[in-house]
Image (cartoon, rainbow, N blue to C red):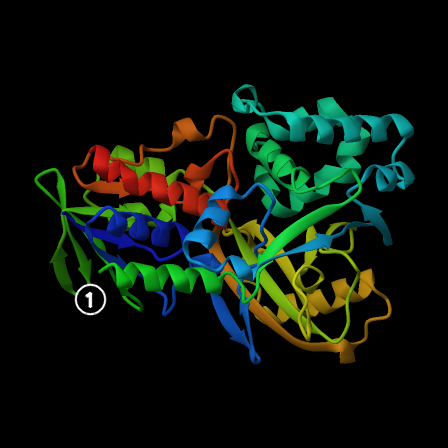
Amino acid sequence: MSKIAVVGAGPMGLSVALQLVKNGHDVTVFEADDRVGGMTASFDFGGLSIERYYHFICANDKPHFNMIKEMGIEDKLKWTETKMGYFYNGNLFDWGNPVALLKFPALSFISKIRYGLHAFISTKRSDWSTLDKVEASSWIRRWVGYKAYDVMWKSLFDLKFYDYANNLSAAWIWTRIKRIGNSRYNLMKEKLGYLEGGSEILLLAMQKRIEELGGKIKLSTPVGKLVIESGAFSGVESGGAIEKFDSVFCTTPLPYISRLIPDLPEALKQQYDDRKNIAVVCLIVKLKKAVTQNFWLNVNDERMDIPGIVEYTNLYPMDEHIVYVPYYMPGEHPKYADSDDVFKDKVRNHLKLINAELTDGDFVDIHVSRYRYAQPICDPDYLSKLPPVNLPVKGLYVADTSYYYPEDRGVSESIRFGIDMANMQEKA
């Protein structure tokens, strides 16, 4: 049995810790927040416990299903037939099925065929290796044409990635198309899942299981430094004290690593510093009525600086209508420094543009969450640019959601990768 530290109690950190205690190790989890979950954590929104950032479950999220079953909460997994829409230049259209595509007036018939063929083939493709070094926007344009790219994709890229929009990995974009496409149970209908009670139900069950198996979870306990002595990891500094450990699994965002582990070689720290991330300002809006009947609404309208909205209660029915409005941007962008009130005013205006029947009286409450390192920017050949998880420092393992590439960040991938990461200890 080894004495092992885990830094971070998000879904990946909890999965690492759970697997390690199941493997027989003495595990302590350090978490700076006052609750487990990371980006998946819930908060009290005027009496409603809800996640800070939206999550949903797709039909092919097998690691997620396995963990739900292991925690004995299968009865909490629910499915909803969801809809997708597209708000384009002031008009709301159905989206997400062949009939909606054929009815969409902004594309020629040939463009529609090319767009649909690209989406269909992407869902059937299984090998991403040939897309790994390909730039995404040029890949999409070759398939769908310049007009369809400008109408359907360009604003989504620009309003999420800004200056990085034209240097994204096609493999990474492909996995997003495939994941959503494979959640359809026929050409016309899609279904997505959720946990009754939110992701919190699973996270708390994992926390409880870790503690039942002898693990310790220290909340509100930020780590100041991971200590390296004589070329090996030796301990965790927190609150001015150093606790000795045999190994550590660090799951914090990569941009923190060079400060958290200052004794790493300079070249290795530079690799972490070179990884870029998109920040998010995510507004959760509580309304008296729905904006649309869609779960996901893509947006392409020059009056709005958002790529879309998520009407969460069109997936997970609640007494009050909940809409997530994410504003993505590089953290260094001046807009990220705008006040919460600036974003709240924009959200009210944006939602009233989408649904002209909404009035100020329909807005019950708005909450603003910010996360500086929300989304790794995955450029072509991304994985080869990351340091190894098992670093050339004995007992030191480092990874964040960047390592899911080409998969996107998500609870299911966090669980899968966390288990695999923990099992590296047994092979060391």
- Residue visible at 80% across and 45% down in the picture: 95
Q: Give amino acid for label 1.
A: Gly
- Residue visible at 51% across and 36% down in the picture: 378
Observer-nearest of 2 and 380? 2
Residue, far left: 230
Picture coordinates of residue 335, whole percent (x, y): 59, 57
Confirm whether residue 265 shows in the render: no
Residue, far top: 130
Name the element at disc 1. Answer: loop
Picture coordinates of residue 274, whole percent (x, y): 40, 38
- Residue visible at 40% across and 26% down in the picture: 384
Q: Is residue 242 left or right of residue 249?
A: left
Confirm whether residue 69 shows in the render: yes
Observer-nearest of 204 and 9? 204
Q: Which residue is denoted by mark 1 in the rendering? A: 239
As displayed, is residue 417 above or below residue 108? Answer: below
- Residue visible at 55% across and 33% down in the picture: 172
Tag 1: Cα neighbours inside 10 Å, few (<14), some, or many (≥20)?
Answer: few
Observer-nearest of 72 and 366? 72
Determine which quarter of the picture holds residue 176: top right
As displayed, is residue 211 above or below residue 70? Answer: below
Picture coordinates of residue 80, whole percent (x, y): 69, 56
Determine which quarter of the picture holds residue 428: top left
Q: Is residue 186 left or right of residue 399?
A: right
